[in-house]
Image (cartoon, helix red, strand yellow):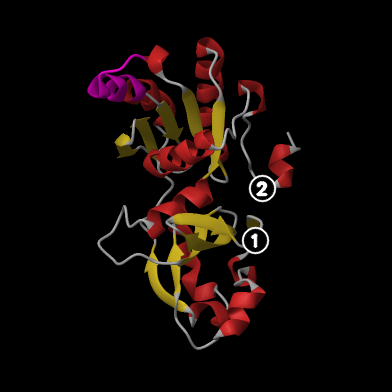
């Protein structure tokens, strides 16, 4: 039996999910500024619902960022503490990749699945965290490095931008869609739909974590750190 516990607090939502032999349970709640207080009860409640003990968990996963600095610290510290106490490996998962997985697998909307995804997460300070993804057999594959820029700097990968500039075949995903009117025309003309409601979720993270588990892509607790993308935060005070 494989059992993976995942959590995410990278945005105003707080979510916990459990993968147990292909079955996934999730507790997803919008909890602005309350994730730290709610996280432990969420974990306990979901474990009780699944009928398992914390000691039965094989690995621990978390949304490693990018996202809210405070939220990422909460997730990383919680997972590290549990991993050290249980002597279990950790699986950090990109929050942008989790958003892309949700869009590709239609977990949050009734709209048809997409194969090309542009994930934008509001980074405040007039910027967005973003990345472009291509679906391959239901999994998101990054077409570039994750980036932090002003909305005007967001672009499609060159090979896709030039392939058919008249085709609207990209989905814009995430809270960064609030900046859609500031995106370059070369991007907006290629958008077939916008899904600003899709946030990083533990459900998506635990699916991606299980794939990483199968590939033995595991880390020690001490090596599981947040990814901020903003240098003045990671290296500043």
Q: What is the residue that sits farthest to the right in this orientation?
A: 235
Question: In the figure, residue 234 lies in which quadrant?
Answer: top right
Of the pair 104 and 99, the residue shown nearer to us? 104
Q: Is residue 52 magenta?
A: yes
Separation (CA) of disc 2 from disc 1? 14 Å
For the N terminus, the image quarter is top left
- Residue at image point 55% right, 32% down: 91
Q: Is residue 172 magenta?
A: no
- Residue at image point 49% right, 31% down: 61
- Compared with 166, 11 (above or below) is above
Of the pair 39 and 190, the residue shown nearer to us? 190
How many numbered marks does the figure carry?
2
Of the pair 128 and 60, the residue shown nearer to us? 60
Q: Give the magenta range.
A: 43-53
- Compared with 186, 48 (above or below) is above
- Residue at image point 61% right, 36% down: 226
Q: Can residue 71 be seen in the rendering of this structure?
A: no
Find disc 1 in the rendering and name its residue.
144
Find disc 2 in the rendering and name its residue.
229
User: In front of the other: label 2 or label 1?
Assistant: 1
| Residue 199, horizontal then vertical, whole percent | 41, 50
Q: Residues within 10 Å of mark 1 (few under 14, many from 20)?
A: few
| Residue 168, horizontal then vertical, whole percent | 44, 81
Q: Can residue 122 be seen in the rendering of this structure?
A: yes
Q: Is residue 25 left or right of residue 102?
A: left
């Amino acid at each position: 039996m494989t059992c993976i516990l995942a959590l995410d607090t990278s945005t105003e939502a707080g979510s916990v999910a459990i993968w147990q032999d292909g079955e996934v349970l999730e507790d997803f709640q919008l909890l602005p500024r309350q994730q730290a207080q709610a996280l432990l009860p969420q974990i306990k409640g979901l474990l009780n619902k699944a009928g398992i003990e914390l000691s039965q968990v094989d690995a621990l996963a978390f949304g490693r960022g990018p996202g809210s600095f405070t939220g990422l610290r909460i997730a990383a510290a919680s997972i590290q503490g549990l991993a050290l106490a249980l002597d279990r490996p950790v699986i950090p998962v990109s929050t942008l990749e989790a958003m892309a997985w949700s869009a590709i697998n239609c977990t949050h909307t009734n709209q048809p699945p997409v194969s090309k995804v542009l994930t934008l997460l509001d980074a405040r300070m007039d910027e967005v965290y973003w990345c472009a993804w291509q679906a391959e057999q239901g999994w998101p594959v990054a077409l570039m490095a994750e980036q932090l820029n002003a909305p005007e700097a967001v672009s499609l990968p060159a090979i896709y931008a030039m392939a058919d500039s008249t085709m609207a075949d990209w989905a814009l995903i995430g809270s960064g869609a609030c900046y859609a009117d500031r995106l370059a025309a070369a991007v907006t003309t290629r958008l077939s739909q916008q899904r600003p409601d899709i946030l990083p979720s533990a459900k998506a993270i635990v699916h991606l974590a299980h794939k990483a588990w199968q590939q033995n892509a595991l880390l020690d607790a001490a090596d599981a750190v947040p990814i901020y993308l903003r240098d003045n935060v990671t290296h500043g005070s």
